Amino acid sequence: MTYAKTAAFTQEQQQLARVAKALAHPARVAIIQLLASKQTCISGDIAAELPLSRTTVFQHLQELKALDLIRGEIEGLTVCYCLNTELLQQVYQQFTAFFIEATSGAVCGPDDACAC
Amino acid sequence: MTYAKTAAFTQEQQQLARVAKALAHPARVAIIQLLASKQTCISGDIAAELPLSRTTVFQHLQELKALDLIRGEIEGLTVCYCLNTELLQQVYQQFTAFFIEATSGAVCGPDDACAC
DNA sequence: TCTTCATGTCGTAAACATGCGTCATATTAT
DNA sequence: ATAATATGACGCATGTTTACGACATGAAGA
């Protein structure tokens, strides 16, 4: 096991990292934006609007679905993919808390040994 | 080149994905939180507080530094790593805009063919 | 039934990420 | 100068992600 020591960090750190990973590819960012703009989408349409093959888009959709950020339900011959807005709202709050924590620190004081 | 088609997406999508990638590992989240809590840090101290070797921590520091999220200045025998609060603030706003866009969509209307 | 059309699955190749040991460099004190 | 100590660079083994073509499945109509 020379890999993936994620278990050694806190749950919050892992959760934030997991979601960040989901957003860590422009295709997945684009997919979420697409689903946000149109309220209803099918996987074929999504592939048509991205510079990727249908297979690859499907793979990205699966990753987002694994985190429950989006949901897909079979609708006859097509599938309806939707954003999970409740979860996105939660994630939004997590990121907000993190960034507030990160930006509140400001710079080093003059009594520190550090001069940055 | 069967890989990395990132160039085909918008600048915003790429930028968001890039930052998300930086946060896509619990170690890097932990590093930022650590730097936020203590105002001044040296790389050795950071490794001491994480369940990773000094070499690996250094690698994560380099990644954060490559995005300019943190800065390091040599201070005699040690190095002072600091958060780039201005950039973090900008990134915060980017994420906020994205999440607002993503969560505003709500659910599918009743006149859609989709029932989710 | 059997074609068709759309979605989902499998296998695979290449690029990238993670983690660490080991060596290099550079500064301070003896 | 030289030892001690701290950071930085290199290389390697292993695991993961990305991207795609080719095949499987399953519903709806001719």
Image (spheres, coloured by chain):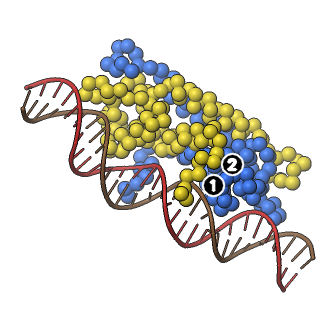
Chain colours: A blue, B yellow, C red, D brown
- Amino acid found under the numbered disc labelled 1: His
| Residue designated by label 1 | A60
Q: In which quadrant of the rendered view does residue A73 lie?
A: bottom right
Residue A68 as seen in the image, left or right of residue A8: right
Number of callouts in the render? 2
- Amino acid found under the numbered disc labelled 2: Ile
Picture quarter with the C terminus of chain A: top left
The answer to whether B1 is drawn above or below residue C28 in the figure is: below
The answer to whether A93 is drawn above or below residue D10 in the figure is: above
Residue placed most toward the observer, C1 or B108? C1
Q: Residues within 10 Å of mark 2 (few under 14, many from 20)?
A: many
| Contact check, label 2 and label 1, Cβ < 8 Å | yes
Quote the CA–CA distance across marks 2 and 1. 9 Å
| Mark 1 secondary-structure assignment | helix
Q: Residues within 10 Å of mark 1 (few under 14, many from 20)?
A: some
Question: Mark on residue A31?
Answer: 2
Residue A85 as seen in the image, left or right of residue B72: right
At 36% across and 44% down in the image, what residue appears?
B56
Q: Chain of mark 2?
A: A
Residue B7 as seen in the image, left or right of residue B112: left
Q: Chain of mark 1?
A: A
Residue A46 percent coordinates (x, y): 73, 53
